């Protein structure tokens, strides 16, 4: 008999009885004798090693027959994945990425001379039992499998050669084992991407040769142990995406070999310790998404090797000092979503390698330094939602590489400088809601790569029809609320325009044929009344433009009849509107409170007693909950506040959202405005957030998750199709979805918020690449965010997850996963034991999510189609994923 797989099961009982004894003895002997012996086996017969390998073979399912060479006909040194030393002992077993399933072949660890065991990237599962690692083992890689249970292993001798231990991306749970400390020769330890809990044991510092440590993406809690400072050889430390709390211990400043330090997405509080300034080799410092407060210690600017500094999404305050000039290697500086004040230091102009500067959503004032962009490689500049004034600097594009120029919601003045206007690398330009003026420079309308251009809410003027428009990639153009006059240009040089807003200008004449032609194409769907409204001199266009027809001498009789009908229609519409308006908008009240005059607009009966609450408006606090009234009449409202609102933002925008009602959306019940401050009152909801660190997602089964998805999809469809709400959008991420009712776990409610510049909690759209720009206005970008949410519902992973490798973008990974069709690999492990037809639904939903997140917005479905397909996923068992499906679902394995 030559078929090893068939032979092995017969031998198994014998081997399991005898191997542990046999091989433990061998291990003890080999430790002493291995180096001294000649090529003949030292106490181990090669036959024993063959048996060990054959037993291991029998615990694998090998659907692709990678292990067909593992049979008695050939010597095991010739078997695929097996390597031998000069004495024909097994020194390595490397079975990476062979689509193996089954359980851990623990017998491999009885091989007395083995140095390398690599089982990574398979579908092996089950628990470790107790794994005794042979003293000879130097490299163990079990990453990217489906192993679970505790990390239960120890040392099978008196000393260990183990240098590399990679158990990442499995489902290991329990705590990080104290026993780890005996592996003192470890240089690399990766336990990331599991479900480990508990604290980081102080004993980990005994691993004093460790150079690389990853514990990221687990559920670790407690503080970082002070002893971590003893790990003076450590160069890479990744502990992000856990639940660590407390402050960063100053002892971390003793880890002077550190090159990368990553503590992102934890719950760290307190100040950044000034001892970090001792880490002179540090090149990457990532502390974003914590609750750190206080100023950036000056010592940080002694870290002259820094390439990337990202402290965004914290509560940091104070000014950014000129000392930043010492960071000569700095390429990326991200400090957005904090409370920084003061000016942008002139020193940023002396950083020769600066590529990305993102300071948005702070309270930074003053001008943008004049020399910014000179002699550097500036590619992305996002200073939006601050209090900047002065002019747009001349040299921003001197690198010739500037692709994103995002300065919206400031008080910038003057025109667009010529050199910026002719910056041909630009792709995305957002200058809306400033005080910019002048005419558009002529080259500015001929930028080949721009796909997004928003200049609305400024004081630009002049004609735009007397220049060449050649913007072939333009998809979104907003010139609303300016002083442009004259006719509309014949075309904007792009056939890809999806969103166009020219409203509230002084355009006159007839809508050109060119624009009418656009509107005939399917892609250009959004020229409607709102796109050209508020231009009193405009006429014509296609019927959907809603404009009066241009004067025409023909049809005099029917014109009179038509106008009578129109008048009648208009009157009844007006009446209807009035009725509706009165119902929705109960009162507008002026009120003096705390010495300020406030206008209060109420959209809902529940807030009707609000004005009675004395002193409320002067003392209101962002994030607080307002309660008044007693018993069944008690009212609770959530307060959010905005300061630094640009003057262009007004009641019109607020009223639109105030009137929007949907059972899945927390409604805006009232808004209040004083001279430069807005206060918004939303319906207060109690429930569990779906996403985030302690989100409810894990507790939901697939059916409930589907109901969340369809609920959100229906809101978005209504927002875009029925209400045509442009200018704000639902905060479509799991963090902004509340599950209101435990019993009906899937009654999702979206916290729909106006994205007012200056509001403290900006919606995070789930668009990692565009995170700097808060609100996206098109339907297709909401479809994208929805796709990201759907992926999150299916996989349980956040939008960016470093454990996924590469850029960590879950979208990229989901696209790969979908192609694999292998549900167990990517579906959220907390949705266990699904029957085959549910898996088919999940694959269908993933297919939809992949389409929604297509890089090319034109390839994404519309919101209506999304709802349809999502319903179809649950209704019809259309497989359509891949032919291999039946084969890949584990229960159908032969
Ligand atoms: C194994 O053999 C190669 C040549 O065949 C030799 O270079 C090497 O030093 C040997 N290694 C050991 C550990 O004996
Ligand atoms: C084997 O696994 C790889 C990676 O896990 C996957 O890409 C491939 O589609 C699988 N092939 C089969 C036939 O299962
Ligand atoms: C473990 O294996 C994976 C996949 O083969 C590989 O990417 C990773 O680098 C390995 N880990 C170490 C520490 O070598
Ligand atoms: C541990 O590493 C040291 C230095 O690299 C080496 O001398 C020693 O032999 C190693 N210990 C074992 C058990 O391999
Ligand atoms: C480590 O850092 C702490 C505080 O920064 C300091 O008091 C201590 O002396 C340092 N320990 C060593 C061994 O350098
Ligand atoms: C974060 O820490 C604060 C105080 O240290 C605590 O009140 C809060 O519950 C923690 N949040 C999470 C999500 O762990
Ligand atoms: C920066 O380093 C210098 C020595 O290189 C030291 O004298 C100075 O105190 C440090 N600055 C801060 C703020 O720690
Ligand atoms: C700018 O980038 C280019 C390549 O991207 C690089 O070769 C060059 O050194 C950079 N310049 C500076 C000043 O960093
Ligand atoms: C992977 O592990 C999870 C959690 O332990 C389990 O629910 C799932 O069935 C496993 N999948 C496979 C293919 O073994």
Image (cartoon, rainbow, N blue to C red):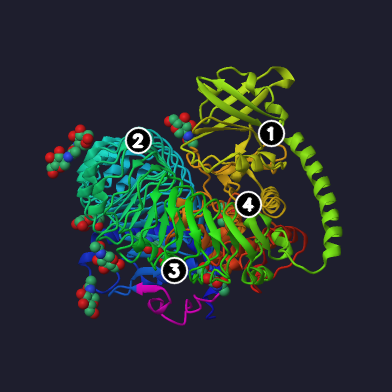
The mark closer to the camera, 4 or 2, is: 4
Please state the horizontal and vertical placement of residue 194, each as a whole percent of the image: 47, 50
Please state the horizontal and vertical placement of residue 232, each as a whole percent of the image: 22, 46
Please state the horizontal and vertical placement of residue 173, each as a whole percent of the image: 49, 46
Identify the image quadrant of the C terminus: bottom right
The residue under label 1 is: 603
> In this rendering, would 683 be left or right of 216?
right
- Determine the CA span between mark 1 and mark 2: 36 Å
The mark closer to the camera, 3 or 1, is: 3
Q: Residues within 10 Å of mark 1 (few under 14, many from 20)?
A: many
Q: Are marks 1 and 2 in contact (CB under 8 Å)?
A: no
The mark closer to the camera, 2 or 3, is: 3
Give yes or no for residue 822 being in the magenta stretch. Answer: no
The residue under label 3 is: 447
Secondary structure beneath dot 1 equals loop
Q: Looking at the image, which residue is at 39% across and 79% down?
A: 78
Numbered range of the magenta stretch: 64-83
Q: Is residue 578 visible?
A: yes
Q: Are marks 4 and 2 in contact (CB under 8 Å)?
A: no
Give the overall secondary structure of the magenta segment.
loop
Secondary structure beneath dot 4 equals loop
The residue under label 2 is: 317
The residue under label 4 is: 534
User: Which circle's residue, 1 or 2, is located before the other in the chain?
Assistant: 2
- Determine the CA span between mark 4 and mark 2: 42 Å
Q: Are marks 4 and 3 in contact (CB under 8 Å)?
A: no
Relative height, residue 871 to residue 325 (above, below): below
- Determine the CA span between mark 2 and mark 3: 38 Å
């Amino acid at each position: 008999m030559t078929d090893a797989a068939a032979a092995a099961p017969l031998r198994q009982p014998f081997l399991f009885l005898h191997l542990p004894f046999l091989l433990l003895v061998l291990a003890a002997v080999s430790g002493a004798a291995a180096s001294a012996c000649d090529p003949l086996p030292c106490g181990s017969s090669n036959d024993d090693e063959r048996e060990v390998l054959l037993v291991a073979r029998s615990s694998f399912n090998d659907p692709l027959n990678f292990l067909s060479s593992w049979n008695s006909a050939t010597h095991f040194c010739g078997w695929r994945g097996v390597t031998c030393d000069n004495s024909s002992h097994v020194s390595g077993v490397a079975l990476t990425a062979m689509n193996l399933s089954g359980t851990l072949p623990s017998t491999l660890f009885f091989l007395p001379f083995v140095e390398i065991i690599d089982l990574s990237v398979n579908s092996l599962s089950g628990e470790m039992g107790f794994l005794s690692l042979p003293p000879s083992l130097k490299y163990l890689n079990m990453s990217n499998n489906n192993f679970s249970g505790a990390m239960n292993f120890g040392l099978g001798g008196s000393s260990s050669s183990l240098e590399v231990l990679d158990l990442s991306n499995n489902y290991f749970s329990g705590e990080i084992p104290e026993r780890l400390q005996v592996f003192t020769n470890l240089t690399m330890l990766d336990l990331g991407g599991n479900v480990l809990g508990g604290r980081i044991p102080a004993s980990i510092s005994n691993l004093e040769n460790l150079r690389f440590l990853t514990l990221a993406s687990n559920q670790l809690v407690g503080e970082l142990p002070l002893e971590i400072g003893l790990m003076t050889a450590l160069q890479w430390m990744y502990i992000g995406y856990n639940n660590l709390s407390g402050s960063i211990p100053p002892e971390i400043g003793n880890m002077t070999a550190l090159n990368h330090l990553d503590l992102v997405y934890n719950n760290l509080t307190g100040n950044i310790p000034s001892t970090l300034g001792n880490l002179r080799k540090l090149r990457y410092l990532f502390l974003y998404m914590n609750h750190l407060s206080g100023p950036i210690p000056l010592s940080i600017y002694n870290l002259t090797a820094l390439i990337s500094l990202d402290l965004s999404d914290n509560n940091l305050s104070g000014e950014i000092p000129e000392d930043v000039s010492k960071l000569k290697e700095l390429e990326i500086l991200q400090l957005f979503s904090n409370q920084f004040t003061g000016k942008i230091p002139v020193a940023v102009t002396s950083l020769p390698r600066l590529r990305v500067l993102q300071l948005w959503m702070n309270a930074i004032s003053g001008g943008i330094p004049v020399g910014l962009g000179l002699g550097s490689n500036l590619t992305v500049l996002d200073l939006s939602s601050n209090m900047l004034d002065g002019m747009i600097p001349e040299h921003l594009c001197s690198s010739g590489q500037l692709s994103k120029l995002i300065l919206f919601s400031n008080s910038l003045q003057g025109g667009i400088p010529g050199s910026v206007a002719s910056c041909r690398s630009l792709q995305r330009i957002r200058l809306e809601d400033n005080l910019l003026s002048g005419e558009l420079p002529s080259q500015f309308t001929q930028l080949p790569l721009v796909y997004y251009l928003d200049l609305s809410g400024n004081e630009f003027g002049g004609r735009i029809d007397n220049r060449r428009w050649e913007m072939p990639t333009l998809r979104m153009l907003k010139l609303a609320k300016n002083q442009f006059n004259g006719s509309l240009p014949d075309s904007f040089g792009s056939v890809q325009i999806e969103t166009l807003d020219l409203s509230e200008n002084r355009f006159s004449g007839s809508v050109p044929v060119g624009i009418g032609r656009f509107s005939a194409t399917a892609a250009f769907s959004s020229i409607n009344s709102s796109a050209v409204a508020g231009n009193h001199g405009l006429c014509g266009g296609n019927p959907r433009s809603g404009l009066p027809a241009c004067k025409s001498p023909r049809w005099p009789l029917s014109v009179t009849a038509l106008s009578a009908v129109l008048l009648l229609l208009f009157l009844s519409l007006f009446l209807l509107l009035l009725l509706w308006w009165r119902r929705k908008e109960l009162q507008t009240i002026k009120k003096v409170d705390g010495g300020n005059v406030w206008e209060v607009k109420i959209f809902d009966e529940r807030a009707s007693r609000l004005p009675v609450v004395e002193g409320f408006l002067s003392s209101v606090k962002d994030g607080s909950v307002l309660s008044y009234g007693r018993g069944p009449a008690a009212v609770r409202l959530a307060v959010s506040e905005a300061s630094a609102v640009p003057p262009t933002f007004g009641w019109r925008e607020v009223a639109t959202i105030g009137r929007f009602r949907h059972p899945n959306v927390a409604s805006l019940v009232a808004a209040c405005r004083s001279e430069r401050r807005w206060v918004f009152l939303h319906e207060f909801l109690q429930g569990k957030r779906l996403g985030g660190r302690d989100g409810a997602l894990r507790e939901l089964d697939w059916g409930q998750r589907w109901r969340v998805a369809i609920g959100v999809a229906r809101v978005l469809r209504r927002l875009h199709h029925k209400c045509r709400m442009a200018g704000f959008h639902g905060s479509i991420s799991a963090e902004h979805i509340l599950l209101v009712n435990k019993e009906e776990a899937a009654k999702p409610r979206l916290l729909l918020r106006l994205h007012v510049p200056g509001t403290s909690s900006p919606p995070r759209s789930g668009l990692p690449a565009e995170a700097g720009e808060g609100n996206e206005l098109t339907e297709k970008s909401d479809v994208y965010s929805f796709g990201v949410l759907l992926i999150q519902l299916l996989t349980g992973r956040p939008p960016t997850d470093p454990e996924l490798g590469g850029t960590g973008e879950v979208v990229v990974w989901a696209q790969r996963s979908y192609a694999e069709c292998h549900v167990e690999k990517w579906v959220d492990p907390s949705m266990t034991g699904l029957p085959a037809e549910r898996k088919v639904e999940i694959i269908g939903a993933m297919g939809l999510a992949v389409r929604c997140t297509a890089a090319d917005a034109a390839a994404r479905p519309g919101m209506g189609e999304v709802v349809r397909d999502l319903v179809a996923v649950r209704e019809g068992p259309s497989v359509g994923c891949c032919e291999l499906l039946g084969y890949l679902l584990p229960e159908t394995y032969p």
